[in-house]
Image: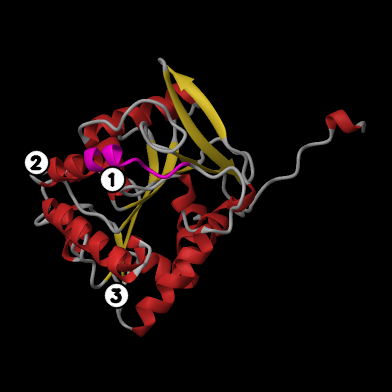
Amino acid sequence: MNASSTPEPVITAYAHTVAKTVTVGGDTFAYRELGPTEEIPVVFFVHLAATLDNWDPRIVDAIARTRHVIAFDQLGVGASSGQVPGTLEEAADDAYRFITKGLGYDTIDVFSFSMGGMIAQDLVVKHPELVRKLVLTGTGPRGGKDIDRVVGTTYLDIVRAVLTRSDPKEILFFNRDAAGKKAAKAFVERLAERTAGRDEPITTKAFRRQLKAIQRYGRSAPSDLSVITQPTLIANGDNDRMVPSVLSEDLHRRIKGSELIIYPGSGHGGIFQYWDKFAPVAAAFFNN
């Protein structure tokens, strides 16, 4: 076998992925992929204000050991072009174009967190045939009680972060007790493991557009989630201040046959605080 025919080694560490782009209808989407090649990938839908550098590598890597993982920047964020759409429905439409037209997939599995979970729900409701399995973490349904209050909570905690010289995610995602603070510091350190080819942080304008889109989502009429018949795993902490934990229970009730995990003593980032317990569960869910 000559060198030219030797297959490239499979990358299973998110910190070492190569940044890629694909253009669809004049819009350029930035993405990273890792794990073994397969026909049905796991596509990651990221949270408010996040770029590709905001995924916890411990969770991504655990899934990528056996599955092909694709993470992408929404339009107007990171290395993707354009501007943040005004609604989450539009963001779901953008994701659909990226997945089907840009990458050519007609079936995917979905891993989502927070705002990403809201976009993923809109995607599944509109295109149920696209999604085979669904993971919804730290998120809630369209029209869910108090979702629209995320704007005030977010701005307040950003001020607190500035005053305490902390990363806003430490306050927004974690409880402020000893265990929460320790988990927060460890999470932020893990996010810094990638040292080359990092995304530019989200702009203030894009951040505000995302917040307004979430507010509209929270104040909209509920979606009919009975159309979600795919195997669904729902997870959160028991003290989520951004997207109240009761909304995870609401999703569980409305999505027939779904599985719910609530981690004690944790907040919005419960899956990151308990990554060592959650990552193998998520990997097994996608492999089952």
Q: Position of residue 276 (x, y in %)?
A: 50, 71
- State which tag comes first along the sequence, 2 or 1: 2
Residue at point 46%, 53% (across, down): 55
Q: Are marks 2 and 1 in contact (CB under 8 Å)?
A: no
Q: In the figure, 185 relative to 178: above or below?
A: above
Residue 146 in view here? yes
* CA distance for labels 1 and 3: 33 Å
- State which tag comes first along the sequence, 3 or 2: 3
Left or right: where does residue 182 sit relative to residue 40?
left
Q: Position of residue 60 (x, y in %)?
A: 52, 54
Report the span colored magenta. 200-209
Element type at mark 2: loop
The circle drawn on residue 175 is: 3
Element type at mark 1: loop
Q: Position of residue 212 (x, y in %)?
A: 17, 41
Q: Give the overall secondary structure of the magenta segment.
A: helix
Element type at mark 3: loop
Q: Position of residue 137 (x, y in %)?
A: 32, 57
The circle drawn on residue 229 is: 1
Residue at point 42%, 45% (across, down): 201
Based on the picture, tell me whether residue 205 belongs to the magenta stretch. Answer: yes
- Give the amino acid at mark 1: Thr
